[in-house]
Image (tube, rainbow, N blue to C red):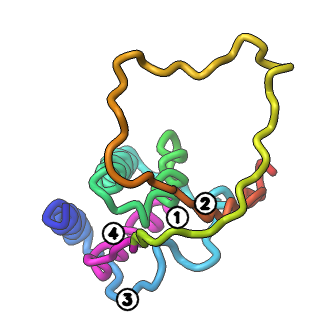
């Protein structure tokens, strides 16, 4: 995946060189601080630039699939503007490529230690779904090894989109 990212950055750089442009060499975050794509009011992209924008989004989505989930939210957010991308949206996409070029060895740390969390009471949904039941395959193999506990901490950014909240 690291080689794919390097090649993707190289492709974007060559596209920019043809237009006398370049990627930023120093970026700290995936998107510029405080950037709100829903408030973008710059000009709509021309046909060629819009086509490149959609290609770049496709490349970024594939990079996410290959494991760079550190850019997942931002790529998903910008991909929603593929129908009518603006100049500012393209600049944000290019910012992501700058981030990838300067943060090529980013990692997500997995901690296999047990986190002692308080288990919440399971709600009773039977009044809403009286026929529902867990379907366990009859040929399901016996579990092997230690049980796995998945704990996720999420910052939901509730109502962050100032246009639709």
Name the residue carrying label 3. Answer: 26
Q: Nearer the viewer, mark 1 or mark 3?
A: 3
Number of other residues with Cα within 10 Å of mark 1, as a class: few under 14, some 14 to 19, many 20 or more: some
- Asked if residue 132 is positioned above or below residue 54 in the image, the reply reads above
Look at the numbered discs 2 and 4 and tell me whether their residues touch, using CB distance below 8 Å.
no
Name the residue carrying label 2. Answer: 37
Numbered disc 4: secondary structure: helix
What's the residue at 50%, 72% (across, down)? 31
Name the residue carrying label 1. Answer: 88
For marks 2 and 4 on the same chain, the one whose residue lies earlier in the sequence:
2
What's the residue at 56%, 60% (across, down)? 151
- Asked if residue 131 is positioned above or below residue 103 in the image, the reply reads above
Number of other residues with Cα within 10 Å of mark 2, as a class: few under 14, some 14 to 19, many 20 or more: some
For marks 3 and 4 on the same chain, the one whose residue lies earlier in the sequence:
3
Name the residue carrying label 4. Answer: 97
Q: Which of the 4 quarters of the picture holds residue 115?
A: bottom right
Task: Tell whether 157 sits left or right of 49.
Answer: right
Q: Position of residue 144 (x, y in %)?
A: 32, 44
In front here: 142 or 115?
A: 142
Given the current orientation, which residue lies at the most extreme right position? Answer: 127
What kind of secondary structure does the magenta stretch mostly adopt?
helix
Residues drawn in magenta: 86-109
Which label belongs to residue 68? none
For marks 1 and 3 on the same chain, the one whose residue lies earlier in the sequence:
3
How far separated are the C-alphas under marks 1 and 3? Answer: 18 Å
In front here: 8 or 129?
A: 129
For marks 3 and 2 on the same chain, the one whose residue lies earlier in the sequence:
3
């Amino acid at each position: 995946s690291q080689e794919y990212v390097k090649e993707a950055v190289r492709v974007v750089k060559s596209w920019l060189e043809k237009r006398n442009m370049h990627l930023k060499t120093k970026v700290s975050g995936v998107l510029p601080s405080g950037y709100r794509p829903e408030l973008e009011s710059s000009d709509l992209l021309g046909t060629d630039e819009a086509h490149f924008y959609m290609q770049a989004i496709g490349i970024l989505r594939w990079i996410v699939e290959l494991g760079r989930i550190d850019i997942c939210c931002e790529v998903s957010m910008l991909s929603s503007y593929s129908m009518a991308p603006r100049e500012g949206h393209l600049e944000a996409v290019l910012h992501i490529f700058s981030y990838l070029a300067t943060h090529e060895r980013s990692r997500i740390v997995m901690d296999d230690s047990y986190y002692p969390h308080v288990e919440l009471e399971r709600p009773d949904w039977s009044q809403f779904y009286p026929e529902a039941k867990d379907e366990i395959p009859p040929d399901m193999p016996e579990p092997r090894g230690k049980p796995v506990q998945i704990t996720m901490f999420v910052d939901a950014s509730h109502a962050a989109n100032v246009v639709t909240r």
